[in-house]
Image (cartoon, helix red, strand yellow):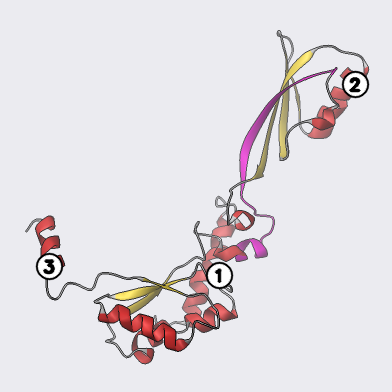
Amino acid sequence: MKASVLLREQFVSCNPPRSLFPLLWLHGTPEETEETLRREIRTMEEAGCGGFVIESRPHADYLGDGWWREAGDPGAWTVRVIGVKPSWSGRMFDEEYYPFGIAGGKVLDKMPDYRMQVLTKATFRWSGGDAGPEAMPFDGSVIKIVCSPEGGGEVVGFADRPEWEAWASARREAGDPGAWTVRVIGVKPSWSGRMFDKMVDYLCPEVTDCFIELTYETTKRRFPEY
């Protein structure tokens, strides 16, 4: 049977497969009572859903005591609390918010030196008659500075900002009118938007280990039977 035909038969069936898992949003607010949550879950079950996914994005205490208290035992949600058949299941997201891998900021709390960074380059023109070398337009951590004289000539390089500033100051004090193309290569914090202050270095294995411990391993210890 073609997949499209099978899909259509399932849609029009009086007893379609329970393949939908809506999101159950947990906010951690006083208004979100157990009675309210039971009613929402029961409505999902009565509508033919196969289960639900506990949505963590709006929760104010993700992976904290409030989160574990309200997330509760997945088995209790589906069997003891609402009394539906055991095959009906509740699931949990493994992150507070996109992008995955930050444990709601708790990875960076434990590993503050592992903030996400990107390799970047800034290029600008400088001459001895311009503003002082301290005005270099680059706000990251410098790896290399390369200066090329306009019109050709010897290219010079510097390992850090102090070396460049000393060289540029010397040329300025000497009244050197030459113009240079300056390329600054370095690293700086990356990402933008809501999760900017929580982003981590995804290329570091220790960061991944920390994330797994904070999420998967902690969940496993709390709910070993699942």
Q: Could you give the CA–CA distance between mark 1 and mark 2, rounded to whole angstroms?
A: 53 Å
- Tag 3: amino acid: Val
- Tag 1: amino acid: Leu
Helix, strand or loop status at disc 1: helix
Residue identifier under label 3: 12
* Residue 110: x %, y % from top left: 66, 65
- In this rendering, the answer to whether 106 lies above or below 179 is below
Where does the magenta region start and end? 106-129
* Residue 153: x %, y % from top left: 73, 9
Residue identifier under label 2: 170
* Residue 176: x %, y % from top left: 87, 13
Is 164 magenta? The answer is no
Helix, strand or loop status at disc 3: helix
Closer-to-camera residue (93/119): 93
**Relative to 123, 94 lies left or right:** left
Q: Is residue 88 visible?
A: no
